[in-house]
Amino acid sequence: MENHMSKKVKICLLCEYAYSLLTGETDEIDIGGAELQMSILAKELAKRLYDVSFVTFQKTRTSFRLFENIKIYNAFDCKTSGYTYLHPWNIYKLLKILEIIDADIYIQKGKSPLISVISFYSKLKNKSFIHLLSSDNSASSDLNIKTIKNLKNIIYRYGVKYCDYVICQTNHQKELLNNTIGKMGRVIKNMCIINQKENVRNKTNNLNVLWVGRLSKAKKPDLFLLLAKNIPDFRFWMIGAISSSEELNYYHEIKESAKMIKNLDFIGFVPHNKIFGYYEKSCLLINTSPNEGFPNTFLEAWSCGIPVVSLNFDPDEIICKYELGFHSMTFDDLVKHTSQLLKNESIRNNIGIKAKNYVLREHNVNNIIDEYEKIINEIIDIEKSNHHKMRG
C-alpha cells in the first residue's frame, strides 16, 4: 500500500515486556498476547520502511539497542515493583526517552498507567496516539467509575477517552467501548504468523490435549485439571508461566495438583519461539478463561490446524460461525465436546482444515498491516491539512 514517505514517518510503540520477543532472547516472564501482537506490529512496520522505535519496561542489559531496524529503549524496570510509572523519577526518564524519539505517532496496547502518560504527552506535543485494547474488560469494567473501588480506573479511563484512535479486537469490544464511554473504536483483527508446516497428528503420540496461558485464577486452569480427570484415556499438557508475584502460591497449587493426575503433564513455562513444537504434537486446544479479548493461543492452534474447545468464551461467536471447534456453555459440555473430538479423527481433521483456512483469510499479517497503514495515512493527511490551514 502506498504511504506518504517524503520523509520517514516516526512511530513509537510501547509495551511492558516485549523485549525478548523483539530480540528473540529467552526470558521467563509473563509474556502475553499484547507483547506478541506489538512485537509483530513493530517488525512489520519496520519492514515497510517506517522509522520504528519501541519502549519496553523490563530490566535489560542496556538502555538502548538497535535490532532489525527497530530502536529499542528500556525506560525502567516495572516488573519487580508493580506499576511504578507514576513515580516522578520514572516519568522523567520516560519523558526524556520520548523527547529523544520524537515520534509522529505513538501506539500502546493493554491496560496500564502508561496509557495516561502517553495520552497526555501526545496531546502536549500535538502528536497522534493509537491505543489497542487487550480484552473485553478493557472496553467495559476497566473503564467504569461507579464506586470508590473503581477510582483506580480513572487513569486508564482518561487515557482511553483522550487518545486519537482506539483499536478493538472484535465487534463486541467496539460495542462495549461505545456503550461504556461513548467512544467509537476501529476493529482491526489480531495478526498471526502462519505455521507453514503440514501437520500430521493422527498418530497416537500426537493425541495430546493442550492448555496454554498464564496460571492465574482468572483463567481457571483448575478446570483443565478436572477435565483431564474426567477423560483418563488421553494425555493432557499444561503450559503456563507464573502470572504475578501475588499469584505465586496459586501457581504452585496448580503445579502440585497436576502432579497427582496420571494423564496430565505439567510442562510450565515454554519460550514462545518453542511453543509450536507442542502445538504440532497436540490435537486440541482447551480454553477455560471466560474473560479474554482475542487469545493468540486460538490463532496459534488454528494456524496449526488444531480445533479449539472453549468454555464460556467465543469472540464474536467465530468458533460457532466458522466451525473452528466448540463453544462449550457448561463444564459438562466441555467434557462432552473434548471427548467427541478426541474420538473422532474425521471431525477433528475437517475442523482443522477450516481453522487453518480461517486464519489464512482473516488474520493475514500483510492485510492487517494495510489496515494500520490506512490509519497512519489518515493521520498524515490530517496533519497536512492542518498545516495548509495554518499557512493559509
Image: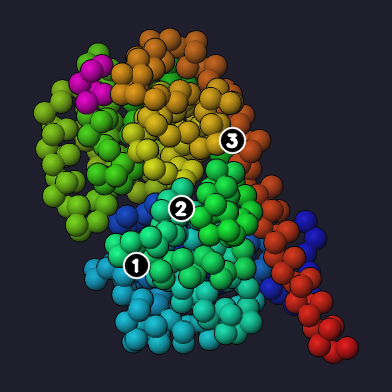
Q: Position of residue 235 (x, y in %)?
A: 27, 22
Q: Position of residue 133 (x, y in %)?
A: 50, 55
Q: Which mark is residue 140?
A: 2
How many numbered circles does the render carry?
3
- Badge 1 is on which residue? 151
Q: Which mark is residue 359?
A: 3
Q: Residues within 10 Å of mark 2 (few under 14, many from 20)?
A: some
Name the amino acid type tagged 3. Answer: Val
Q: Which mark is residue 107?
A: none
Give the mark nearest the N terminus, 3 or 1. 1
Q: Secondary structure at mark 1?
A: helix
Give the mark nearest the N terminus, 2 or 1. 2
**Membership of 122 in magenta stretch:** no
In the image, residue 89 above or below residue 274: below
Query: Is there any visible trace of residue 194 in the rendered image?
Result: yes
Residue for point 34% across, 67% down: 151
Residue range highlighted in magenta: 226-231
